[in-house]
Amino acid sequence: MKIILELGGNPSRMYRVIELAQQYPSAQIVISSEGSPDLVVGLLRGAGISDARFVLDFKAWDTVTNFINTLQLVRSYVPGTLYVVTDQFHMKRAMAIARAVYFLRGIKIVPEPYMGSEPHPPESEELIRYDQIRSWIWRLTGYLQYDKAVKDQRMPGIEADEQHARQQGYPVSK
């Protein structure tokens, strides 16, 4: 089984998700805390992707939680391959986190960068190491170190998106 995991933060990444979904017509799609559920669902449905193939997950507030909060959902599909979709400038950090979270779980992780973003400088090595360490601490101990202010700032919007998605009857994870 193939899983496509889109990390929230840039709804334009959905174009790469759609390309992959068309390339792998049996792949399941997990959208992690992406904004505007109407836009996301509209793009997927407009590309002919049925609701049965995707689920919106609203538990993440940063890149580390994109991975750890979708882990059980992703694993429930018993995947052999996990395609990670994020912006090119963000991919190095995303893959460092993914390798920690998915280490020795028997799932091949494949980076699938979205290349259409505005140019950004690469993320700092310091940030990459910091999130990689946070991921390993979580993996080894179950403890998630995070910035409470970031979570507190982002979660009200994410929760509002989830509530809206549920009201619209969109496929939302439990």
Image (tube, rainbow, N blue to C red):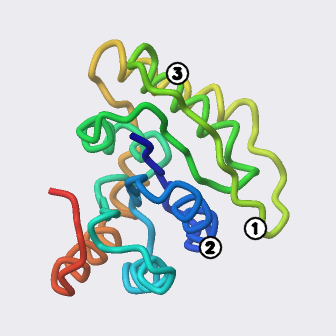
- Could you tell me which secondary element the residue under label 2 belongs to? helix
Q: Indicate the position of residue 49 as horizontal and vertical percent values.
A: 42, 74
Vertical relation: 30 (above or below) 22: above
**Residues at marks 2 and 1, CA–CA distance in whole angstroms:** 8 Å
Q: Nearer the viewer, residue 148 or 11?
A: 11
Q: Nearer the viewer, residue 113 or 9?
A: 113
Q: Residue at x 75, y 50 (%)?
A: 89
Proximity of marks 3 and 2: CB atoms separated by less than 8 Å: no
| Residue identifier under label 3 | 133
Proximity of marks 2 and 1: CB atoms separated by less than 8 Å: yes
Q: In terms of image quadrants, where is residue 162?
A: bottom left
Does 12 sit left or right of 146 as displayed?
Answer: right
Label for residue 117? 1
Q: What's under tag 2, amino acid-wise?
A: Ser
Q: Residue at x 35, y 37 (%)?
A: 68
Q: What's under tag 3, amino acid-wise?
A: Ile
Q: Residue at x 36, y 19 (%)?
A: 139
Image quadrant in which the C terminus is located: bottom left
Which is more N-terminal, label 1 or label 2? Answer: 2
Q: Nearer the viewer, residue 16 or 22?
A: 22
**Residues at marks 3 and 2, CA–CA distance in whole angstroms:** 29 Å
Q: Residue at x 28, y 41 (%)?
A: 77
| Residue identifier under label 2 | 12
- Could you tell me which secondary element the residue under label 3 belongs to? helix
Does 16 sit left or right of 28 as displayed?
Answer: right
Q: Indicate the position of residue 125 as horizontal and vertical percent values.
A: 75, 31
Which is more N-terminal, label 3 or label 1? Answer: 1
Vertical relation: 151 (above or below) 162: above
Q: In terms of image quadrants, where is residue 94?
A: top right
Q: Indicate the position of residue 91 as horizontal and vertical percent values.
A: 68, 44
Q: Indicate the position of residue 166 as horizontal and vertical percent values.
A: 18, 77
